[in-house]
Amino acid sequence: MKTAFSYSTVVLYVVTIITGGTSWYAAKLQLTDVSPVISLIYRFGCASVLLLLITAISRERLTYTWREHLSFAALGAFGFAVAFLLIYKAAALITTGLIALTYSSVILFNSVNAILFLRQSISWTVLVGAMVGLTGIILVFSPEFLNNEWNWAGFGYAITATLAFSFANISAVQLQRKGATVLPMTGISMGYGAIFLLGYALLTKQTFNFDPSPVYVTSLFYLILFPSVIGYTTYFAVVGRLGAERGAYTMLLVPLVALAISSITEGYRPTVWAIIGTIMTLSGNYWVITTKYQPAVNTDT
């Protein structure tokens, strides 16, 4: 058994949270005349090319068997196509706060799926910490939850997106256990995700256009470089090192970073319940990451 975090894992963990938290505001700036699906194709297509270029420069392995490519395609389909398409559908029916709350339940999905697909024993430490953290997130978003009429279709889209993202997490752990390194795994999978999104865009007859405005271009560049190239690489590295259930705990802190940015850019003012919820979430996070664990696999970015 080892202590929970090495210094390098701490850095990966923090970078994942910061890039994920800032992506919410950047994604909001992408809502122009360009269809969200088309923006996702630009984002993941360009990010995939950059990741594969970095992989080639670093001389990491780029040739894989067709079975491994099936796993890459599964990760890309679940993590970068299905999950994002369903999130945008959910966003048309419920608020982003409720989506963030629902998405945080990926910790519970990952705990169950790790037992089913990775043959891991249940981690009571993670489950207790996750429940404390989820309760905190519920308190943070309680005003938004109480002031909006419940929409079962929107919730259904959001929870299905969360399940799809959980399957992507499991695929990432399985691939790393088989020897795939993070950079090519993320780049290839993201490329498959972009291809699936392209197929969806063609089937639904989406308009392929581009917004040359500085706001759209800048936010797109940011989403490509930071949340996609850097953020997903560090996230999958954390998942590989800590396991799907512990790695997913970053998903509880991401909404808090997003709210902090919202308080600066959009005038958000936290309630007393939000402050209590934040403390609970941070406490649950501390509980999970400072206990001893058995890493799923050693990974290097």
Image (cartoon, rainbow, N blue to C red):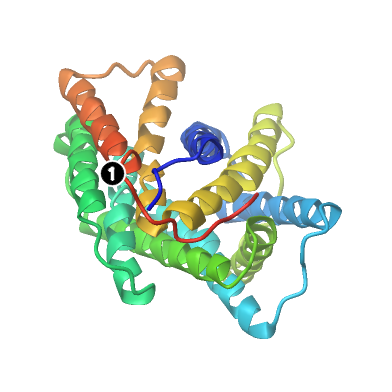
Locate residue 56, reporting x and y percent.
83, 58
Q: Nearer the viewer, residue 35 or 70?
A: 70
Residue in the picture at 31% in, 53% down: 107
Report whether 18 appears left or right of 282. right
- The residue that disc 1 covers is 101
SS class, disc 1: helix
Residue in the picture at 58% in, 41% down: 227
- Asked where in the image residue 204 lies, by quadrant, the reply is bottom right
Q: Is residue 135 above or below residue 92?
A: above
Q: How many marks?
A: 1
Locate residue 61, reporting x and y percent.
77, 66
Q: Nearer the viewer, residue 183 or 94?
A: 183
Locate residue 187, reporting x and y percent.
68, 59
What residue occupies the far bottom of the structure in this picture? Answer: 66
Residue in the picture at 34% in, 67% down: 114
Q: Amino acid at mark 1?
A: Leu
Q: Is residue 88 above or below residue 9?
A: below
What residue occupies the far front of the structure in this picture? Answer: 1
Q: Nearer the viewer, residue 257 or 207?
A: 257
Residue 156 in sight here: yes
Residue in the picture at 52% in, 64% down: 172
Locate residue 296, reporting x and y percent.
45, 60
Report whether 271 appears left or right of 225. left
Report whether 212 appears left or right of 284. right
- Asked where in the image residue 169 lies, by quadrant, the reply is bottom left
Residue 148 in sight here: no
Packing grade of label 1 (10 A; few <14, some 14-19, many >=20) is many
- Asked where in the image residue 202 lies, by quadrant, the reply is bottom right
